[in-house]
Image (cartoon, rainbow, N blue to C red):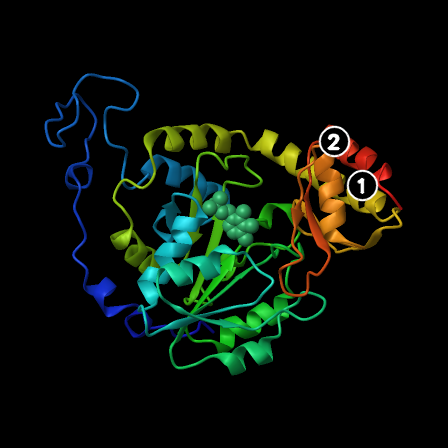
Amino acid sequence: MAKVFNLADWARPEMLALKPYTSARDTFTAAEGEWTFLDANENPNATEVNRYPDPNQTELKKVIANLRGCDQDQLLIGNGSDEVLDLIIRAFCTPYKDDMLIMPPTYGMYAVLADINSIGMIKVPLDATFQLRPKEILAAVTPNTKAIFFCSPNNPSGNAFNSDDIQILLEEFDGIVVIDEAYIDFTDFSSWSIKLSNYPNLIVTQTLSKAFGLAGLRLGIAIASSEIIALLKRIKPPYNINSLSQENAMEVLRDTKTVNTQIAESISERKRLAQELNTFSWVVKTYPSDANFLLVKVDDAAKRYTELLDQHIVTRDRSSQENCENCIRFSVGTPQENDKLIAACKSLSE
Ligand SMILES: *Cc1c(COP(=O)(O)O)cnc(C)c1O
């Protein structure tokens, strides 16, 4: 049975009442035929970018909705997931009053965005195997907790969370549950977006920065009920996705064959890399990964990081994160790059 979620009980009243800016391109959308646009004070001399972009990203949404199996009105596109996550916080959390829950080690932007928006932060660390602790999480919820944020597969640990634990949170927490699926394309777990009809308090975020190879374009998405999406759309900057990004993304998304080949290669390389890394005496443990990176516990992370840097290989020392002491995160590269990494690792001191 679907959960009951009353948006008005959870959204910021100011955001619900907001009278959004109406842009020129919103007020009038051209139908077929020839039109003379004298409505937006643009430079009329045609270049690739002299006109404002489509504020609703209609064409791009068609392609993404088709790809992700959702309706267009269940989609919000942001300037990277970072903008999407920021919009969610601004829509639901009142500064200096509300708080949000995160489960470290997790993606660093959640805490930064909470700080920027002056939102309180409750932390309930993952367990030793980097899984959720639903009972402790629910016990930590306060009357002002408006949202729970986590990523599955998780960054930096790489694992996807147990579905049963996620389901408990979706069922027992009445506020917004944000599941950041930046790495969903690298795992066999299916997206939680297929459960949206059961959980109207769920917002799934995804990105074109990882599997789709478009980190430089800055495109993130939220998939949620049309009601939540409508609220987020009201508060987003009108022209948040530039026209070059919209066009470029459509081209890449239409060629799913290339993307799928690259994903398959990344997964097989992840397996190879883990096997190779485990042969080194200074590697303590390679954590299971459902993503395009591996978290690896080593004897001395600072030392190994520097040794690899000396060979011009840049990795990420995650030692400062909860439960990640002496852990280095390795992104999976091309087969050639991974060969380079393995060769470099072989040359390190025992
Ligand atoms: C990389 C990553 C993102 C991507 O953010 P963009 O702003 O879309 O590039 C989002 N969430 C997590 C957990 C990530 O690791």
| Residue at screen point 10% across, 27% down | 38
Give the left or right position of residue 319, taking residue 74 as reference.
Answer: right
Please give left or right for residue 289 compared with residue 107 in the image. Answer: right
In the foreground, 199 or 337: 337
Q: Position of residue 75 (x, y in %)?
A: 38, 49
Residue 82 lies, with reference to residue 341, above or below; the image says: below
**Residue identifier under label 2:** 335
For mark 1, give the secondary structure. Answer: helix
Residue 71 shows up from this direction? no
| Left or right for 210, reference 33 | right
Q: Which kind of residue does numbered mark 1 sit on?
A: Arg
Res. 16 image quadrant:
bottom left
**Residue 9 makes an appearance in the image:** yes
* Residue that numbered label 1 is attached to: 272
Residue 119, position as x, y percentages in the image: 38, 67
Q: Which mark is residue 119?
A: none
